[in-house]
Image (cartoon, rainbow, N blue to C red):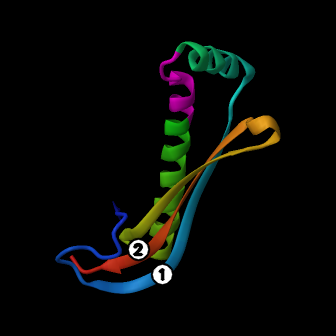
Amino acid sequence: MLVTTTNTIEGKKIEQYFGVVVGEAVMGANVFKDIFASIRDIVGGRSGSYEDELTKARKIAFTELTEEARQLGANAVIGVDIDYEVIGQNGSMLMVSICGTAVRFSE
């Protein structure tokens, strides 16, 4: 499955558009990660625990996106946009939302 942020596929003809597909993942950030992230904010540096959660959420969202496209008969998703949000009470959840247009292009 080809996934691209562009609206075209260079050298390929898009034969069919299936519509918008979406993949979403919401991950909880637990108390211990919040404590260690707060310490890192004070002393500087990167928060590996949050980066790991974002990576997991992004992979889940991409998997959902491509699976939805595959079920429609697409072999690519174009115009992909990735959004990150902090949601929930006191920003306790991390959300990744990925959307694009499912298409079939000629090989």
Q: Which residue lies furthest to the bottom in this view?
A: 15
Query: What residue appears at the point 68 percent right and 22 percent down from the top-left corner?
Result: 34
Q: Where is residue 104 in the image (x, y as percent from the top left)?
A: 35, 78
Q: Where is residue 18 in the image (x, y as percent from the top left)?
A: 48, 81
Query: What residue appears at the point 44 percent right and 64 percent down from the top-left corner?
Result: 80
Q: In this view, does 26 lie to the left or right of 22?
A: right
Query: What residue appears at the point 39 percent right and 70 percent down from the top-left corner?
Result: 78
Please name the amino acid that badge 1 sits on: Phe
Relative to 64, say whether 37 is above or below. Answer: above
Q: Is the magenta stretch mostly helix, strand or loop?
A: helix
Sort mark 2 into few (<14), some (14-19) or many (20+) by Cα contacts within 10 Å: many
Location of the N terminus (image quadrant): bottom left
Q: Residue 18 carries which label?
A: 1
Relative to 37, say whether 103 is above or below. Answer: below
Q: Position of residue 99 (x, y in %)?
A: 52, 64
Task: Give 63 or 30, whichever is nearer the viewer.
Answer: 30
Relative to 49, say whether 80 is above or below. Answer: below
Determine the secondary structure under disc 1.
strand
Indicate whether residue 78 is drawn in magenta. Answer: no
Tell me where the magenta segment starts and ends, as one range. 44-53
Q: Position of residue 102 (x, y in %)?
A: 44, 74
Q: Do the residues labelled 2 and 1 touch (CB within 8 Å)?
A: yes
**How many numbered discs?**
2
Determine the secondary structure under disc 2.
loop
Sort mark 1 into few (<14), some (14-19) or many (20+) by Cα contacts within 10 Å: some
Mark sitting earlier along the chain (2/1): 1
Q: Residue 74 carries which label?
A: 2
Relative to 100, say whether 63 is above or below. Answer: above
Query: What residue appears at the point 53 percent right and 23 percent down from the top-left corner?
Result: 47
Please name the amino acid that badge 2 sits on: Ala
